[in-house]
Image (tube, helix red, strand yellow):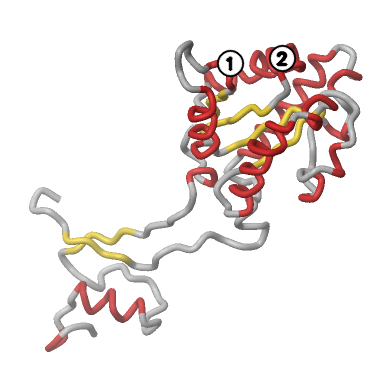
Amino acid sequence: MFGPGGVHDAAAVRRTIRAGGWTSHTSGLAPGYVQGNVVILPRVHAGDTMMNGFCSYSHRDRKYLDRLQVHLAQMEREGLIRSWCDRQIPAGEGIEPLIKAQLEQADLFLMLLSPDFIASPYCQGLEVKRAIERRAQGEAMVIPIILKPCDWKTTQLGDLTLKAAPDDGKPICKWRPQDEGWNNVVARIRLAISPRAPSPAHPAGSAPRCSRGSVRRSSPSG
């Protein structure tokens, strides 16, 4: 029984649950109140929101970026992902401030790997660095996409032992036709952002932290 004289009291229910004194179901413990169970997690791990994708690439690989965006069009139409790259910056706007803003908003980093990407101080020094930091904080996912044969496993991305796309690390440039390779990449992206996929912050077998048995007073209208 909660509350004085056996009267069920929502505040007492919350205090008891938080103190670990109640571990059973909470239905009916506080008549006149509506129970709400809340799970708090980063948007990247929520299955019902659109992912903000950041495409990091060398400008020498622009034609590959174009094909990636074509293949992502259906996922965008489904409301699963919104891809962004620096080519979307309007004329007259500051380039670096907008790129930095997108780096903070991204839920998914798509790294287009090639010798030119690895040689780019900007890609490695800013974009890759920030993507790795946000992944470590459980705020974003990182998917390496191999465009051309390159020594990417010795870079910062290689240190993470990330599984790259396409399958078996076969570079896009070696697929015939290349659209088969891109189709494989999109399949891997779909799998990665599926609500069932393990996340960096919550590996398989673990679960996000959630509150237990929170209650709210119901309004007269219900």
Disc ID at residue 87:
1
Disc ID at residue 62:
2
Q: Residue at x 64, y 17 (%)?
A: 69
Residue 105 sits above or below residue 32 on the image: above
Judged from this view, the residue extending furthest toward the bottom is 5
- Label located before the other in sequence (2 or 1): 2
Q: Quadrant of the N terminus?
A: bottom left
Q: Residue at x 51, y 17 (%)?
A: 89
What is the secondary structure assignment of the residue under circle 1? helix
**Amino acid type assigned to the residue bearing label 2 in the image:** Arg
The residue lying toward the viewer, choosing from 158 and 43, is 158
Judged from this view, the residue extending furthest toward the left is 220
When asked about the image quadrant of residue 123, the answer is top right
What is the secondary structure assignment of the residue under circle 2? helix
- Mark 2 and mark 1: Cα distance apart in space: 10 Å
Q: Is residue 15 left or right of residue 176?
A: left
Q: How many numbered discs?
A: 2
Residue 152 picture location, percent across and down = 84, 37
Verify CB contact (< 8 Å) between mark 2 and mark 1: yes
Residue 181 picture location, percent across and down = 81, 21
Q: Residue at x 67, y 28 (%)?
A: 56
When asked about the image quadrant of residue 115, the answer is top right
Q: Is residue 27 left or right of residue 10?
A: right
Residue 168 picture location, percent across and down = 89, 35
Mark 1 Cα shell of 10 Å, populated few (<14), some (14-19), many (≥20): few
The residue lying toward the viewer, choosing from 51 and 20, is 51
Mark 2 Cα shell of 10 Å, populated few (<14), some (14-19), many (≥20): few
Q: Is residue 146 left or right of residue 29?
A: right
**Amino acid type assigned to the residue bearing label 1 in the image:** Arg
